[in-house]
Image: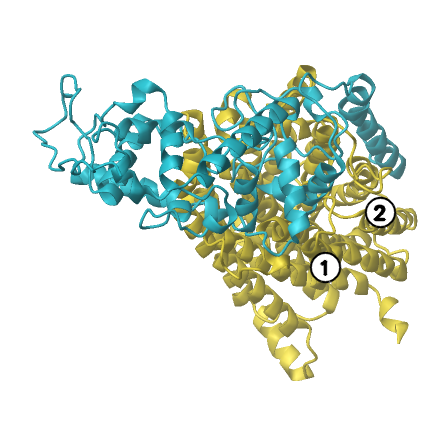
Amino acid sequence: MADFIHKPQSAALAFMVAGAVWFVVGAVYGMFSAIHLVAPEFLPHVAALVFGRERPVHINTMLYGFTGTMLIGSGLYYLPALLRTRLWSEPLAWVAFLFWNLTVLSGPVGFAFGLTQGREYNEYVWLADVSLVIAVACLIVDTGLTIAQRREPQLYVSVWYFMAALLWTACNYPLGNVMWHPSTGAMPGLIDSLFLWFWGHNLPGLLITPLATGAAYYVIPRVTRTPLNSHTLSLLGFWFLIALYSHIGGHHVLQSPIPNWLKTVSVVDSISMILPVSIVVINLWLTARGFGGRVWSDPSARLVMGGIVWYIITCIQGPLQSLPFLQRVTHFNNWTVGHAHIAMLGFGGYIALGAMWHVLPLVSGRPVYSQKLVNLQFGLITLGLTGFFLVLTMAGLVQGSAWHNGETVLRVLPEIAPFMVLRAALGIFILTGSLVGLFNLYMTLRPVPEPELLRRAEEAA
Amino acid sequence: MKMTPAVLIVGALMVFWASTFIIVGLPSMTMKDYPSDIWRPLSPLEREGHRLYVRNGCSYCHSQFIRVSDWDIGAERIARAGDYAGIEPAILGSERTGPDLSQEGGEHSDDWNIAHFTNPRYTTPVSVMPAWDFLTVREIQALAAYVQALGGKDADLRHKRQRDWKRQAQVAYAGGVDRNIEWLHAQVPEVWRRMPNPYPATQAALQRGKRIYQQLCINCHSPIGDGNGPAQPFLGPPPLNFTILRRHLVENRYIGGIFYYQIMNGITGTAMPYFKKHLESEKIWDLANYLAVSFLGYTDANTEPRGIDASYEGNWQNPYPPPAVQESP
């Protein structure tokens, strides 16, 4: 019965499947939220489905559930593969799987009933925080000991990112979530906004970014069948990321009464983020140079490269919108929502999906059921997300400019209604993309007779 | 540089903690949580409301800090660090789908807030806020109490003003329909009472006025202007029935200036909010013409006293004769 938790790479597969399921759940909640911003009386009187409760479910399920879970899954595969060994303990990874997913589950079953700490990106209640930290601790032990028993002397850059993401999260998460105040998860007074946005921005920056970067560093050279362009650039990208990233959360409260020196640090380091980002992107781009055809013709690598493109767009936009003068127009409105979507679904999500489809045959020993469906998923999500980005950015500019010119929030609300309708419509593409992915995954993994597998293998070859 | 496990693990942690010390450690040691001039502690009911505010995700649409560049509700007070002393958590917010609430206390009357939480569209037809009618009465009251405390001592001043004027408004309403209107008109400064609407009530202007009525007024005052919109059961005194204003024109003639003033400034104490932050001059005058023409069958637009016509105006003649003078009973 318990054999499956000892089966090599079973935990990696479990994480990836869970990620695909959470993607659907998160997209459903996103869809409800989008509809409610158009039609607030849609499904009235359902306490669990009011915007204030469904939005955190959407966000946390997408962040931790979809992107985080799926990227950890692919990491649990490439980590031992790159170290020419096995995962130190498969059952320990299953323990991590259990606790990690309990935390994610506490979103839909908790937030919907008001069980939340209410701080953006720090909503999980204390017990769920503990569960997440246990999961990360298990993964650290497993990763560390896998590194210790490695047969490959060199640590490849993906290994650095995977290990570091876990280490940083183990330090970051309890701090930003103020876990020593179990009842509120918050500090009293204004300083709480610094703790809140410390984790609020380190979550994408020091959990999702290193996991996604590690996955991209794994997939791209494998698909192009070329060595990594530069070890030095890998090093620079890695150390710049950690040196700068933890400073930039303050740009979310740039116009609030926090001390000026903190604002300065936040802005300067936000701008500096262009360094590690462009270093990573250049390094991957140069690795793939001359072999773009191999990337484009491989559906999973295309997703990863798409994620890299979103990464560079996100990380040019992000530093720019941290500039105080620009932020007067872009803050507090849908511009930021658009930015968050291309960061999390565009950068993190694309790479998570790409890595998942790339790793899936290696883990399961079965070719992906249908590469056409992977392509379809890429198309649906790309259409949806590109539309999202444009529509939300435009809506944000309308809001920000109108407010800046003296219009009140209430009067601008009808102005953005058409954008919100478009946004909900585009959400259908993303939701469909998540469903297509789950179907493809199910069809890949369901028990099938041997000849069918052979036929698929032939098609894939 | 060779990345050994030691360099990776020790290095990653050391750089992380050094960096974190600057952004979290230093502020923790240097930032002081002193109350500001408007700060006051929250009452137990208000604290309960704060918990509800946090647990129900109100902060995803409502920020709680006013910036130097803001104009909207609350913009009389730019946020200061001490405004948040001791609040745990003080959620500043990252999104303004609805207005900033840091100075919301006393902006509206208590009954307006209860109606608004029950269904935001009762008081604010264009709102996309969810209806909170699944909360208990007690919870809605706690939420309203919290919102009325936002802004500290400044909020208390405003809230007290709301309650004082509510008493007077209720007395006036109890005195009967006509007494009530006399009282309401008596609160309008003298210069406004004999001021005709300077904007011609053209078809286009009436259309614009109608649109504003539908966006801002309709769910209190109702589509036919009789004050029986869905918010009415919550409000005391109830929304004004415009149709009876026909027998209360000043000198049997003027009503435009009174409409303008009441829309601009609201009637503090009642659920009637001020609209001067939402609407500029022409929009208020257009709305006043719409109210007058639709619900009184008469407008004083473009009647004497009037100055030189504005350059855009056509040759518009007011087609509405004032009502016949009524014999006083």
Please state which of residues A255 and B251 is positioned toward the viewer in this rendering. Answer: B251
User: Who's the residue at 60% across and 61% down the image?
Assistant: A46
Chain of the residue displaying label 2 = A
Chain identity for the colour cyan used in the image: B
> Residue under circle 1?
A109
Give the yellow chain's letter.
A
Identify the residue at image location x=66%, y=37%.
Answer: B146
Secondary structure at badge 2 equals: helix
Position of A280 with respect to A321 (left or right) is right
Circle nearer the viewer, 2 or 1 = 1
Q: How is the image coloured?
A: by chain
The amino acid type of the residue labelled 1 equals Val
Quadrant in which residue B265 is drawn = top left
Q: Is residue A69 left or right of residue B269?
A: right
Comparing A225 with B113, the one in front is: B113
Q: Going by the picture, which residue comes out furthest to the left?
A: B315
Closer to the chain start, of discs 2 and 1, is 1
